[in-house]
Amino acid sequence: MVKVSIELGAAGFLVLVTAESIRHALRMAEERYPGLDTRVVLPLDPGTFFAAEPATAGIEHEIPESAAG
């Protein structure tokens, strides 16, 4: 399992997604927020990229981009 931050287009939100792959994380965000552009926030943080076991797939946090800094 991996954990990545995904930016949601003009909505001004970042979401932290745990999934089996980066591609699956993007797909989960696209399904939950249809119509918004999604992109993985780079660079990936090597300290948190691999989710601790046991991890459950899902969108964990919604953070306004302005608060994320």
Image: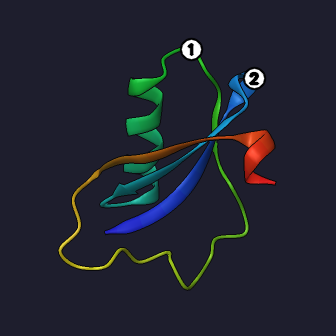
Residue 45: image x %, image y %? 62, 76
The residue carrying mark 2 is 10
Local secondary structure at mark 1? loop
Q: Residues within 10 Å of mark 2 (few under 14, many from 20)?
A: few
Q: Is residue 27 above or below residue 42?
A: above
Q: Amino acid at mark 1?
A: Gly
Question: Looking at the image, do the residues carrying marks 2 and 1 touch, with CB atoms under 8 Å apart?
Answer: no
Q: How many marks?
A: 2
Q: Nearer the viewer, residue 69 or 4?
A: 69
Q: Would residue 9 be found to the left or right of residue 2 on screen?
A: right
Residue 42: image x %, image y %? 72, 62
How far apart, in angstroms, are the residues tagged by discs 2 and 1?
A: 10 Å
Image quarter of the N terminus: bottom left
- Residue 35 is labelled as 1
Residue 32: image x %, image y %? 40, 25
Q: Amino acid at mark 2?
A: Ala
At horizontal 46% and vertical 35% (from top left) the residue drawn is 29
Q: Quadrant of residue 64?
A: top right
Q: Is residue 2 above or below residue 23?
A: below
Tag nearer the camera, 2 or 1: 2
